[in-house]
Structure formats: C-alpha cells, structure tokens
Image (spheres, rainbow, N blue to C red):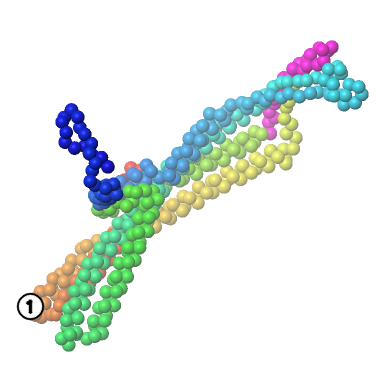
Amino acid sequence: MYSIVAAPPSRPRLVVSHLSSPFIALVFVSALLSVRTVSAAELPPLSFGEALQLASEQSPQLAAQRSAISAAEQATVSARQLPDPKLFFGIDNLPVTTADAFSLTQDFMTMRKIGVSQDFPRAEKRELKGKLAERVAAREQAILIDTRAAVRRDVASAWVERYFTERMGGVVDEQVAEVQLQSDAMRAGLKAGKTQAAEFLAVQLNLQTLLDKRAEFDKQAARAKAMLARWLGDAAARPLAAFTPPAVSTDHGALIEHLQSHPHVQSLDRQIEVAQTEAALAQAQVKPDWSLQFAYQQRGPSFSNMISVQVSIDLPILQERRQNRDFAAKLALTEQARELKEDAIRLHLSEAQAAQSDWDAATNRLKRFDESLLPLSHERTLAALAAYRGGRADLASVLQARRDELDLKLQSLQLTADQARAYAQLLYFLPAGDRP
C-alpha cells in the first residue's frame, strides 16, 4: 500500500505504508456499514398520503396497464388501413409428357409468371375495425383508472393494518408493564403471607396472555409490511407517520349516484361498446369483399409474353352456418357485458354501504369511549390511587384499575382501526375530489 507524505511542494514522493491491506479493507467496510445503518435509522416517516402517491407512481400493475393502453393506441393507427399487397410467382401449363416434358420454352401455353394482388375490404368494415380499436383503447384507459383506485384501496388497507397493529402492540406493552408491577407486588405479598398463591398464578397467566397477544400483533404488522412492499418496494420498511382517519361524508344518495360513474362501471361501459362494435363488425361480414390481381407472364422466345388481370369476390353463401352464427355470438357477448355491469353496480353498492355502516358504527362507539368510558376509567384509576395513598386500599386495586383503563384504551384503538379500515375501503368508492 502506498501513500503520499510530506515533500517539497513541487515533488511529492511515495513511501510504503505500515498499515496492511486487510486492515484497511476492514476499516473501509465498517465505515460503509455504519453509514448505511445511520441512513436507515434516519429514514423519514412514511405518511398515509405518501404511501398512496408512491403506489400510484411505482406499482408494476399500473405500469403493465399503461403498456396495454399504449398497445391499444398503436392498434388504432393500423386498424383502418388496407391489408398489405401480396407478391406471387409460379409456372402455368408446364408439360409433363411427350418430348416437351418439363420444358419452359417449347410449348406455347407454358408461362412463367410474377404478379401482385391486393385485397380490398369494404370501407364500412375498415371503419368498424378502427372504431373497435379506439373503443378497446378507451376500455384500457378506464381499466387503468379503476386499477389505480383498487391499488390505492389495497395500499391504504395494508398501511392502516400495519399502523394500528403497531400502535396496539405499544398499548399491550403498557399493559405488560402494569401486570409486571402487579406481579412484583403480589410476589412480595406472597412472601409476607398476605397474598394467595392462586391470585399470584392468575396474574402470571394474565402476563403470559398479554405476551402472546403482543406476538400476534407483531405477526400482523409484519404481514402488513410485507404487503406494502409489493406496491412500495423499499419504502415499506420506513416507520409510519401519525394518522387520524379523516371525516367521510355520510350522504348515501351522493355515494349511490357516484357509483353510476365509478371507474369500474366506466370500464364495463367501454366493454359494452367494444362488444357492440364487434357485433356490428360480425354483421358486416355478410357483405362480400373483393381483391384485384395483376400478373406478367413470360413464354418461350417463339411466343409473345402476356399480362393478366383478375378480380375475386367473396361469396358468403353459408351465412346460416358462419356469419349469422358469429353475429349471434357477438350479440350474446354484448348481453353478457350488460349483465356484468349490472352485477358490478349491485356489488359495489353493497360493499360501499357495508363500509359506510362500519364507519358509522366505529365513529359512534368512539364518541362514547371519548366522552364517557375513557374519562370514567381514568377517574377510577385516580380514585384508587388516592385511596391507596390514604391507606384505604392496597396496591393491587390500583394496578387493577390501571390495567382496566389500558384495556379500554386498547378497545378504543381497535375501534379507531375499524374506522380506518372502513375508510380504506371507502377510498375505492369516493369521488376523485374526496380522495387524498
């Protein structure tokens, strides 16, 4: 290893370093690891709105749908064009017997030919193909909007699940601490003969139950983080910012009205238009197309060369077995698209009403918790603490009151989680102006 040492300014010189290469490498790697650790620890919190934005920008599902739109838009350019011409060449009237067998020049009927042909589908059919391509592109665009709404709903659900399971895990940690204090107090009472062994064992059982509940919350948070990673990648590992579910409009009429123009319903409307255009195109197949063919034919040197022109016309003489069957099939697909739209409206209406009911129920119960249950529980804890300080109650009663207060706090947090889950579901149905 070489390094630059002090020398006259005009001529620096090199000397051998006393540090070994493995030692330098170890120091360098350690420095890199420490930098990465510090960077990971200082990651900014991931807010609810930022998670939705990142999903809209980075989701592979949305990128795939954008590619589908691009493909459909490219097809709209070529759909109205005439098909490519065809080049053909061959031999006509080649003799295979007598002395002229397989001769290209002896028989006057033998001709070597080359030519081109062009199919001319009816302008009506080309126009219908163009409309079909445009409507497919419009359908793919509507599917993109619906897919974006669905991705935002799923990301919101995963974010909310992780956020509240982590919060509830924190409340359980508070409960574990309270029960541990109660266990320590009872252990001292057990040694002094003031506590029954059954009471002490009951507290130990409660402690283990809380630890198991904490492990369950950890599992749920890990699952939610893994689901977030599907849409957000490395950003899913960031800590989560504080969140309070925003207010949601309770106007059921407006919600039902919006469902008629929901992105999924819009995509089904576009599918109906696609099916109708396909049916019209199938019906137009009963009208024949035509093609033009031109050929130059070369004969032997003793004979003159020739040209030929030929027109071909389709003969749809088996309409009952072909064209009419295709038309009937496309009509059935059109009816299928209409029924799927009706089913989607009913499904979304029931889902939206269920989510709205969950929101209303959680909101009403939270109001009761905030206005009465939690304040009363806190007053009970203060009263038990005052009685203990005055010598009118033991420590176990104080700890029990505190534990009951934490139980109510956990129930309140679970209700807030239910409210947030309902909001995540409602995100799929809310108008664009009401979404974060």
Q: Quadrant of the N terminus?
A: top left
Residue indicated by mark 1 = 390
x%, y% of residue 274? 55, 39
Identify the residue at the far right of this view: 98
What kind of residue is marked 1?
Gly
Compared with 297, 247 (above or below) is: below
Mark 1 burial class by Cα count in 10 Å: few <14, some 14-19, many 20+: few
Q: Which residue is more in the foreground, 123 or 234?
A: 234
Q: Which residue is more in the foreground, 66 or 9?
A: 9
x%, y% of residue 340? 52, 49
x%, y% of residue 377? 19, 69
In this picture, residue 284 sits left or right of residue 25:
right
Q: Which residues are magenta?
A: 286-307
* Residue 11 can be seen in this image: yes
Residue at left 81%, top 16%? 299
Residue at left 48%, top 35%? 70
Is residue 306 located in the magenta-colored stretch of the structure? yes
The picture quadrant where one finds residue 422 is bottom left
x%, y% of residue 251? 34, 50
The mark tally for this picture is 1
Is residue 147 located in the magenta-colored stretch of the structure? no
The picture quadrant where one finds residue 126 is top right
Residue at left 58%, top 32%? 129
